[in-house]
Amino acid sequence: MFKNGIIAKTALVAVALMTTSAQAQETVVWWDFLAGGDGVRMKQMISDFNAAHEGQISIDATTLEWGVPFYAKVQTSVAVGEAPDIMTYHASRIPLAVKQGLLQEITPADWKKMGLSKDDYADATWNAVTIDDKQYAVPIDTHPIVLYYNKDVLGEAGLLTEDGTPKGMGSREDFTAMLQALKETGAVKFPLGSVTADGNFMFRTIYSLMGQQDGELMTDGEFLAGDNKKKLENALATLAEWTNEGLQSTYTDYPATVALFTTGDAAMMINGVWEVPTMVDLHKEGKLFEWGAVELPVIFDHPATYADSHAFAIPANKGKEMSAEKRDAVLEVMSWISKNSLFWATAGHIPAYGPVTASDAYKTMEPNATYSSLTENMIFDPKTPLAGIAGPIFDVMSTYFVPTLNGEMEPAKAVDEIQYELNDMQ
């Protein structure tokens, strides 16, 4: 009897241990590079996720420095098996990451478990995370550049349409005429504020204008092949003309560009959607005029706007196998945040998950709903390991963009130098 009691007790303890093990909370180690307004919002989403999954999954999040420092740390950490379980990644950097063996594939079985599929995403967004018919990340958003505008200044100048958006958005001639009309009012220092002191940032605008001409930066492995040189020259010449005629700010860095717009010294500004929270907060505090944001003007043949995507990726940690339970937890993180990304839209980004942008709640969110139509006209970086945020292509082109946009170098000469240096890198 005593012996049987011991056996029964041992069995109960074993069952209890098995139950505890089965219900053990999974901790998902997370790295991101999100600061500012979108960083605040992602931290809130992480907190909401943890609350919704209490006792099951907990995200342990760390925010690292954006750009080269982040990607360098990922590379070294993967090599020694110390990278996180999940991390944010720019879609534009995925070709290099795949070449370096830094990312795990998001398999068809993974997508099925997450309840996500290709049909949930815009074609350009899905393609941006696809290499050789395999997906290496789950897109969270697209974050293009847009045109911010001061409704008060444009309204007083008679340059708003009946729906409150800027006139002159359909051609180079019409938009230039609008800039000139704003200059003639004397109400602003610059009709248009642009980050003309930072060629890395201006790549976004210039690449958009190339795309409006069906231009390609890379064709069959060659940079600026055929008439693409001329299309890049056209884009540079247009922007240089605006600067030379005092229609666009000269040698302006990023903070100064934002300041020009928010203080009313620039009537319009080309910047990323991530500045939407800045405008929203200032307006709520009574420190900003009435404002709006729309898709870039059509300067050439048709709409086209440069975009990138924040995405979730799973590092390919060397010598460190991820358990099935851990992977399921990571997949739940990516799925839950994707499906609950309406709040992420308040950071200005366009959620990548289609059902969110198709919802009534999103369609009433301004200015997001106004510019979200540009997802049909998005263009991403060429698929090469040389592309991507803080990549070699940005560095080469930046060297020549700044002097050209500020009237110190001829566009044709700049394009010749860019073509030579880009092709010389291969």
Image: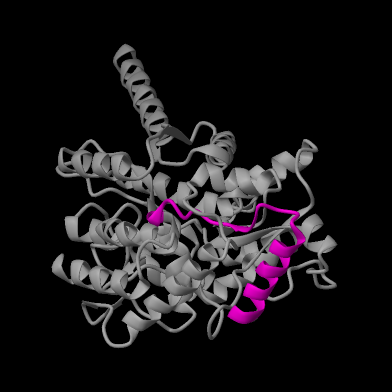
Which residues make up the magenta segment? 172-200
Residue drawn at x 40%, y 46% as measured from the top left: 330
The mark tally for this picture is 0
Q: Which is nearer the eye, 20 or 188?
A: 188
Is residue 169 visible to the viewer in this orientation of the structure?
no
Residue 196 covered by magenta stretch: yes
The percent coordinates of residue 201 (x first, y second) are 43, 55
Left or right of 69 in this view: 158: right
Quadrant in the picture for residue 402: bottom left
Residue nearest the viewer, comparing 8 with 60: 60
Q: In this view, does 327 lie to the left or right of 246?
A: left
Magenta segment: does it hold 191? Answer: yes
Residue 267 occupies quadrant: bottom right
Query: Residue 108: in sight, yes or no?
Result: yes
In the picture, the quarter occupied by the N terminus is top left
Give the camera-side residue of 418 and 67. 418
Image location of residue 264, percent across then percent down = 71, 48
- The C terminus appears in which quarter of the rendering? bottom left
The image quarter in which residue 353 lies: bottom right
Q: Which residue appears at 61% of the width and 43% of the height?
A: 259
Is 304 placed left or right of 355 in the picture? left
- Residue at 59% x, 36% y: name it: 44
Image check: 351 left or right of 228? Answer: right
Q: Residue at x 41, y 52 (%)?
A: 198
In this picture the colour scheme is one colour
